[in-house]
């Protein structure tokens, strides 16, 4: 089954899921109430089965009373699907069409919202190095998942994924041998420390936290497909207030900004790759 296929639960289980989501919000401040239920159901049930728990209520009991258990559940509920140069055509469009306009700025601020374990953040860092913009760019990479951020800061990714990542890099317009950017051991590829210069990782929850700077580029790709319409509107408002005039926002291939309340304030800069510019 995929994330989009319906998972049918009985009435009691639906009540239990509502209680679990409310418990996470009331006790810890993590607000999943506006997430698409189909994905939440699947992730909750997978955790319940992994722990061999008889009911969702038993899972809630662990969340409320067992120290350290919250992190395990958050790791399941947060969005971690990512890869380096994911959707290579997006990065190619960014390099060819957005970068020339960023060159006009003395300083550049980029926000990767919902960065997960950082693969796309380091992809952008490499792109900016190749385009000569790294020294005047600060990348803010945020996620609600502290464990994912810790993983991102290691700059280490499974060696077995490098073949696919290399293909993505080349398709995205990479200018060097991708292997120049990392060293390896028998298990991991370790990306060079120079890529984390002017790179700031921080915990930030798109659902509950506010704006913290003004940015020239905001990348929030393949995150809002997990949000219901009301939550999408809330997050788009946050991004609108965080984006400088003339700034760019990049979304995932199945996401759009045009039907949001502030949609009229954007132009379709590169519609095929979901890149919009605030006007």
Image (cartoon, grey):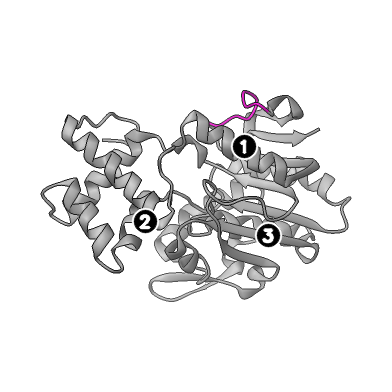
Q: Which residue is identified by label 2?
A: 27
Q: Position of residue 158 (x, y in %)?
A: 42, 64
**Left or right of 182, for residue 75:** left
Q: Position of residue 166 (x, y in %)?
A: 53, 55
| Residue nearest the observer in this picture, 263 or 83 | 263
Q: CA distance from mark 1 to mark 3?
A: 20 Å
Q: Are marks 1 and 3 in contact (CB under 8 Å)?
A: no
**Left or right of 215, for residue 81:** left
What number is the disc on residue 5?
none
Quarter of the image that includes the C terminus: top right
- In magenta segment, residue 181: no
Q: Are marks 2 and 3 in contact (CB under 8 Å)?
A: no
Quadrant in the picture for residue 14 = top left
The residue at the point 82 percent across, 49 percent down is: 102
Up-down relation of residue 48 to residue 35 (above or below): below
Which secondary structure lies at badge 2? helix
Q: Which residue is identified by label 3?
A: 139
Q: Which residue is identified by label 1?
A: 236
Of tags 2 and 3, the one toward the viewer is 2
| Residue nearest the observer in this picture, 184 or 35 | 35
> Most extreme residue toward the left, as rendered?
54
Q: How dense is the environment of label 1, judged by Cα within 10 Å: few (below 14), some, or many (20 and up)?
A: many
Q: Which numbered disc flags the more N-terminal residue, 2 or 1?
A: 2
């Amino acid at each position: 089954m995929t994330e989009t296929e319906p998972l049918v639960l009985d009435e009691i289980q639906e009540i239990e899921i509502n209680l679990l989501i409310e418990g996470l919000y009331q006790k810890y401040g993590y607000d999943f109430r506006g997430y698409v239920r189909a994905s939440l159901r699947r992730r909750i049930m997978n955790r319940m089965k992994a722990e061999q728990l008889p009911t969702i209520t038993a899972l809630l009991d662990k969340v409320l009373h067992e120290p350290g258990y919250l992190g395990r559940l958050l790791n399941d509920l947060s969005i971690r699907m990512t890869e380096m140069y994911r959707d290579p055509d997006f990065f190619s469009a960014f390099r060819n069409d957005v970068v020339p306009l960023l060159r006009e700025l003395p300083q550049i601020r980029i926000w990767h919202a919902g960065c997960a374990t950082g693969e796309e953040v380091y992809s952008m860092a490499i792109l900016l190095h190749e385009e000569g913009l790294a020294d005047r760019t600060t990348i803010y990479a945020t996620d609600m998942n502290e464990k994912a951020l810790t993983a991102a800061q290691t700059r280490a990714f499974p060696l077995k994924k490098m073949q696919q990542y290399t293909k993505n890099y080349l398709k995205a317009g990479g200018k060097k041998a991708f292997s120049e950017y990392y060293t390896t051991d028998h298990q991991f590829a370790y990306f060079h420390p120079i890529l984390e210069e002017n790179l700031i990782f921080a915990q930030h929850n798109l659902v509950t936290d506010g704006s913290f700077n003004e940015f020239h580029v905001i990348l929030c790709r393949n995150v809002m497909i997990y949000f219901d319409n009301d939550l999408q509107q809330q997050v788009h408002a946050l991004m609108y207030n965080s984006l400088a005039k003339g700034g760019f926002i990049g979304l995932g291939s199945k996401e759009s900004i045009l039907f949001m309340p502030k949609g009229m304030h954007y132009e379709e800069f590169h519609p095929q790759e979901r890149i919009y510019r605030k006007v």
